[in-house]
Each structure stands twice: as C-alpha cells, then as structure tokens.
Image: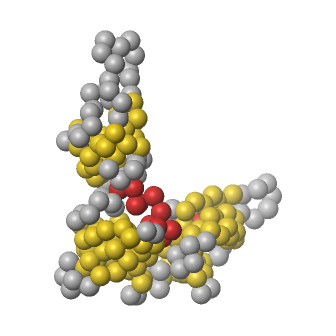
Amino acid sequence: MSSIQATRLRKGMLIKLGDGLFRLLDFNHLTPGNKRGFVQSRMLNIRSGTLADHKFRSEDTVERAIIDEREMQYLYADGDSHHFMDTASFEQTHMSSDVLGNATRYLIPDTLIRVQFYGDEPVGIDLPQTVELRVGDTPPSIKGATASAQIKPATLETGLVVQVPPFINVGDTIRVNTETGEYQSRV
C-alpha cells in the first residue's frame, strides 16, 4: 500500500478506507472562504456495490490500493455476472455488473481485456481507448435532407445507443470511444 495526499486523489483511483475497498467516481476540492479546504468525494464500494460520499480534509492521507493487471479474455454474461478467462493459466473469474459499471456496454465475447486485481480479488477492468461494435438497429437515412449536419441514433450489439452519421446502416461495424461513448468512425 502507498499513501497519497487527499488533494492528489483522481477519478478512477482505487483506495482503501477502513475495511472497505473503494473506487473514486467523482471528487471536488473545495476551499470555502476562510475555512480549511477539503475534498468531497463520491465512491463505489467494490465489495458491496454501494455508493458512499466521504469528506477528506486537505491534509489527510489516504491509502491507495496497489492493483495488479492480468490479460484476460471476456467469455460471456450470465445474468448479472460477467465471466473472464486468464489467457496464461486458463483460470476463470467473474465480476458483477455493479463492479463493472458502464464498461459492460463495451464488452463482446472473445475480447482481450486487462482485468485489475487487488490480491486475488477482481476489482475492475481497463478498457481500450476504442472498441469496434456492430450496429444492430438504426433508422434509414432520409434522402436529400442535407440542410444541416444530421445524426441518428444507432443501437449496437451490446445495447449501447450512440449518435451516428446518416450513412451508417444496420450491420455496419463502427469504432466507439469508450471514455465518451461517442461514434469515432466506420470500420
């Protein structure tokens, strides 16, 4: 474990607080008037899946959890559980949708993903910058309607809905940014 000052916390960090293991979802450093500064944070308890708000004083130090990353293959989803296989040892592990959060919208079977572990416990995944997903449903484009830049919704194979240009059709494969959830290009 390494300690970090509360003012140096960043979104996505994994910290240990008491007996809990938390991922920082949001934080805000505040210095109200002539009072001491503090960091207001919103965190997800990795083990229980519950949200927690916590206020750190600026001078507080927080234990940062050291994580290990392993390359794993995403296998399938079984209800709320998502299964992964270690590419080196062929051992399987699973994580709940609560732990994975929005990342489940970018997972398709047989994809290689970096899975983060705290000890032997899987605590999250590191998605690539972009993923390629197939368009499952989108309305047809309107011919001749080019008065302004048009976009239309497209439902992808994972259920994610993104706004795409009018030339994208059902069955096309598109590249999507995993950080913003936005269309990048047609593949």
Can I make out residue 83 in this image?
yes
Residue depicted at 34% across the width and 81% down the height: 93
Q: Quadrant of residue 61?
A: bottom right
Residue 147 in percent (x, y) is at 38, 12
- The answer to which of 57 and 73 lies nearer the viewer is 73
Q: Is residue 9 above or below residue 89?
A: above
Q: Give the residue at x 79% y 62%.
A: 35
Q: Residue 53, percent across and down? A: 67, 67
Question: Farthest residue toward the right?
Answer: 34
Q: Is residue 53 left or right of residue 26?
A: right
Residue sitting nearer the eye, 10 or 19: 19
Quadrant that contains the C terminus: top left
User: Who is closer to the viewer here, 12 or 85?
Assistant: 85
The relative height of residue 53 versus residue 63 in the rendered view (above or below) is above
Q: Is residue 8 visible?
A: no
Quadrant in the rendering for residue 36: bottom right
114 and 76: which is toward the camera: 76
Q: Which residue corresponds to the image point at 57% horizontal and 69% vertical from the top-left?
A: 44
